[in-house]
Image: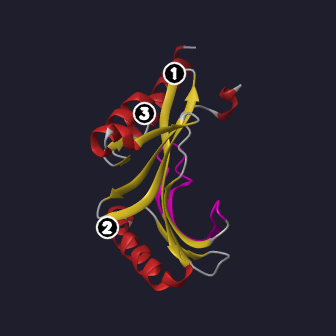
């Protein structure tokens, strides 16, 4: 019994410490909702951060030198509160601006490649025929990718078709999925 408790403790500690260093805008994954909200408000202003059904949204933001029209910060809710577990930065380009969108995508990839090339990098082509990139490894589930840079066609809420450039940090599951209910 003592051996099982020790193994459980070591597994939990490994999960906690393995997520250290994975951050977005200097905010560590696994941070509380309140901490993320305060950090975003300090950076972008109190009236620029919006609650969106338990997640956070900001408009007109930058990450590094890259401008995005909006960003979503996702949280996983569990027995120990909300933990920051995903982020998506998105920017629409007019369809006629494909060359500009591709240049921004490739420059963004060059920036992230410097950080993640020793860990994991993969290039692929999506169903719209655009080159996209996967990067990093999920610190809790190392067989999963950490993030994706994608360029794709999509329709806005107003019905107009745009090219969307997304930088997405995929969900890191801190709570076992069966603990949701």
Q: Front-most of 144 and 112?
A: 112
Q: Front-most of 43 and 45?
A: 45
Q: Quadrant of the C terminus?
A: top right
Secondary element type, mark 2: helix
Mark 1 surroundings: few (<14), some (14-19) or many (≥20) residues within 10 A: few
Q: Which residue is mark 3?
A: 16
Q: Which residues lie in the magenta part?
A: 135-158
Instruction: Work out how far the residue at label 1 is from the one at label 3, CA to CA, in angstroms.
Output: 13 Å
| Residue 64, disc | none
Residue 49 highlighted magenta (yes or no) = no
Quick one: label 1 or label 2, which is nearer the N terminus?
A: 1
Q: Which residue is mark 2?
A: 114
Instruction: Work out how far the residue at label 2 is from the one at label 3, CA to CA, in angstroms.
Output: 25 Å
Viewer-side label of 1, 3 = 1
Q: Residue at x 50, y 57 (%)?
A: 168
Q: Which residue is mark 1?
A: 80
């Amino acid at each position: 019994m003592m051996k099982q408790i020790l193994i459980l403790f070591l597994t939990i500690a490994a999960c906690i410490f393995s997520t250290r260093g994975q951050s977005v805008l200097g905010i560590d994954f696994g941070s509380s909702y309140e901490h993320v909200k305060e950090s975003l408000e300090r950076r972008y202003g109190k009236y620029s951060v919006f609650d969106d059904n338990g997640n956070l949204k900001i408009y007109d933001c930058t990450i590094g030198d890259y401008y995005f029209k909006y960003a979503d910060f996702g949280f996983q809710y569990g027995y120990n509160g909300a933990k920051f577990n995903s982020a998506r930065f998105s920017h629409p380009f007019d369809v006629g601006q494909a060359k500009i969108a591709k240049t921004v995508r490739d420059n963004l990839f060059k920036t992230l490649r410097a950080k993640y090339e020793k860990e994991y990098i993969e290039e692929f082509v999506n169903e719209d025929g655009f080159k996209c990139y996967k990067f990093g490894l999920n610190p809790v589930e190392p067989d999963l990718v950490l993030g994706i840079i994608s360029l794709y066609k999509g329709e806005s809420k107003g019905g107009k078709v745009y090219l969307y450039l997304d930088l997405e940090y995929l969900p890191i599951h801190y709570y076992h999925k069966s603990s949701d209910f």
